[in-house]
Amino acid sequence: DAKTTQPTSMDCAEGRAANLPCNHSTISGNEYVYWYRQIHSQGPQYIIHGLKNNETNEMASLIITEDRKSSTLILPHATLRDTAVYYCIVRPYNNAGNMLTFGGGTRLMVKP
Amino acid sequence: ETGVTQTPRHLVMGMTNKKSLKCEQHLGHNAMYWYKQSAKKPLELMFVYSLEERVENNSVPSRFSPECPNSSHLFLHLHTLQPEDSALYLCASSQDQEGAFLPDGYTFGSGTRLTVV
């Protein structure tokens, strides 16, 4: 699976948008971008995924650059409960086996 | 609870003890996983079971022994652990489906916080 690079940590003010970047310059054509987050002392939770088009759901938006070498997860109105470690993962959509490999992620601190 | 239940939530054990961690999923999934999360380190995949057969063992020391008696239950048997094995142990389950990865179906438990003294 392609390697991803994320900043170690970020701060965001409560109520503002949190923009979390991810670089995946070696992504291949059959690989999707997935985002998970892990709130302290809990297991990771799925947020969103995409291939090349921008995606939005009730939790977040995902913006993928045209060359697919980087992406940004956007939490439009961050709350204190969004404080967590956010993981960007790149892997194929259609191979057998559901193993997820996590990197270091970005520790997002939402401050009042 | 998320549908994946882990017990106990906390465990303190001596280096000569034998203990077991338990994971149970009520989601009808056919694959289960053990992950280890040490302080300041990324999640490490330890074991993968698909259809109750082990499909991956990422060179985990033999003092960790997994068992998957059926698709709903997963155990991690521990013996003669070291202090550096202290970590959060997370169980996950998913529906392993040929030809499609289902990211929103990958469900984690809340973990067992293990301390080896």
Image: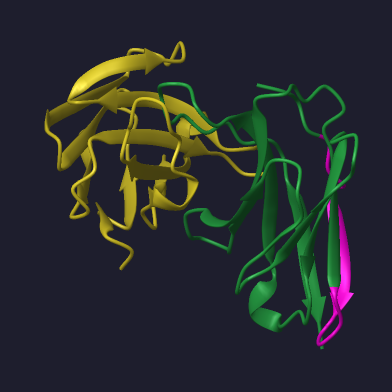
Please give left or right for residue A54 compared with residue B80 in the image.
right
Please give left or right for residue B18 compared with residue B10 in the image.
left
Image quarter for residue B50? top left
Residue A102 in the image, given as x and y percentages of width and height:
61, 36
**Is residue A11 a member of the stretch shown in magenta?**
yes
* A111 over B45 or under it: above or below: below
* B109 over B34 or under it: above or below: below
Residue B116 in the image, given as x and y percentages of width and height:
41, 39
- Looking at the image, which residue is at 39% across and 58% down? B110
Image quarter for residue A39? bottom right
Magenta part mainly helix, strand or loop? loop
Tell me, yes or no, if residue B113 can be seen here: no
The magenta region covers: A5-17
Q: Residue furthest left?
A: B69
- Looking at the image, which residue is at 51% across and 60% down? A41
- Looking at the image, which residue is at 15% across and 36% down? B71
Report the label total. 0
Residue B21 in the image, given as x and y percentages of width and height:
24, 41
Residue A40 in the image, given as x and y percentages of width and height:
57, 63
* A5 over B27 or under it: above or below: above
Tell me, yes or no, if residue B95 can be seen here: yes
* Chain for colour green: A
* Chain for colour yellow: B
Q: Residue B11 or B103: which is nearer the viewer?
A: B103
**Colour mapping used in the image:** by chain
